[in-house]
Amino acid sequence: MTIKVLGYGVQQAKTKLAPLHFERRELRHDDVEIDILYCGVCHSDLHHVEDDWGSNHYPLVPGHEIIGKVTRIGTHVTSFKVDDLVGVGCMVDSCQHCHPCQHGLEQYCEEGLTLTYNSIDRHDHMLTFGGYSEKIIVSDKFVLKIPKGMPLQSAAPLLCAGITTWSPLVHWNVGKKSRVAVVGLGGLGHMAIKLAKGLGAEVTLFTRSPGKEQDALRLGAKHVVLSTHEDQMNAVKGKFDLIIDTVPNIHDINPYISTLSLDGTLVLVGYLGKLDPFLNTTPLIMGRKSVAGSVIGGIKETQEMLNFCAEHNITSDIELIDIQYINEAYQRMKKSDVKYRFVIDMQSLKKDA
Ligand code: NAP
Ligand code: ZN
């Protein structure tokens, strides 16, 4: 048994998103059915639509910053009820028994995580489809509770941009005395600034874009460094304990390594692939520095992040759009022309019904 759903997606690489009908599974015992209210637009959605990683299954319906309302629950579901406000992020399943899964690190599942879209479900082998759609059906273990009172539309980006930057901040023990830098002021970058500031750190933004300084300070950064200015880069040599690099494209990370302190770590969360130019190991060896990577975050820590954000009044700065605007939004995201996350009002999908 399947359910017919309307969404926006693509049928092949490098084409424009358009309305399409697809099928989702009927509820399993542990499933929650969610009517989608809002869905954030992540740069990963754009990477998928452009087939940057060559990993696509079609049709492809993006969207993994999902907020909605529970409409039905499976017979074994006890932690959610109809009308609950809930969230779904980048993953919807994992093996649940490997070492990472047992330790709340489902994103590093040894058998491979099931992504919210463009993955094959491990039970029925159906393709998964994302949040640019009317509804989604997800195992209760991968559904998050939205804390009471949170503004729903600006909470949506916490489900990916929030957790992806929160997880390395917590893993590398960022706190009151930490000096944190963020590379790139986009969806992930602006959340990284807010969350690091919320944890008590002194935050610096590296940006290529003159004109983002005032926003960065308003979002919680204490300093802004134009990465294209050599003298500004030299002025922060040896300064940072942790750098979170959110740049989506290939870029030279060597200048940032020089700005790490002894034992400092640069965590890549954006660009996937080989570095060019190569990484110079000399400053790493001479300063016991590290270059690391990190992908999203586990379900338990995602809930902790949501609760932290509710306590500290942290949400995303968004531009609310109709789904019919999505192709233009992608063009603007490519030009870094978004302050600082597009969120789709899914009610707009009704115009295509
Ligand atoms: P975004 O909103 O487009 O922001 C990226 C920012 O990076 C831009 O605003 C820009 O900031 C900077 N930038 C863009 N192109 C650049 C270039 N060629 N050189 C230097 N800086 C550049 O993107 P996002 O949604 O934050 O996503 C960022 C990346 O993280 C994407 O690759 C996405 O796929 C990835 N991602 C990873 C995970 C994970 O789990 N690891 C999760 C979600 C997303 P300035 O104008 O300030 O320079
Ligand atoms: Zn994302």
Image (cartoon, rainbow, N blue to C red):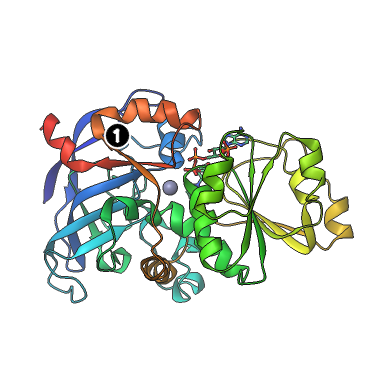
Tally of marks: 1
Q: Which residue occupies the foreground of this view, 171 or 340?
A: 340
**Residue 146 image point, x, y percent:** 28, 65
Residue furthest top in the image? 15
Q: Quadrant of residue 26?
A: bottom left
Q: Residue 328 vs residue 257: left or right?
A: left
Up-down relation of residue 331 to residue 111 (above or below): above
Q: Which residue occupies the foreground of this view, 239 or 294?
A: 239
View quadrant of ligand 1 = top right
Q: Tell me if the residue at label 1 has its CB under 8 Å from ligand 2.
A: no
**Residue 89 image point, x, y percent:** 36, 56
Q: Residues within 10 Å of mark 1 (few under 14, many from 20)?
A: some
Q: Residue at x 18, y 77 (%)?
A: 78
Q: Quadrant of residue 71?
A: bottom left
**Residue 116 image point, x, y percent:** 34, 51
Q: Which residue occupies the foreground of this view, 125 or 204?
A: 204
Secondary structure under tag 1 reads: loop
Q: Residue at x 14, y 30 (%)?
A: 352
Q: Amino acid at mark 1?
A: Pro
Q: Residue at x 12, y 47 (%)?
A: 3
Q: Residue at x 33, y 55 (%)?
A: 155
Say which quadrant the C terminus sits in: top left
Residue 187 visible in the shown view? yes
Q: Which residue occupies the foreground of this view, 224 or 302?
A: 224
Q: Residue 2 vs residue 151: left or right?
A: left
Residue 271 visible in the shown view? no
**Residue 58 image point, x, y percent:** 32, 34
**Residue bearing mark 1:** 59
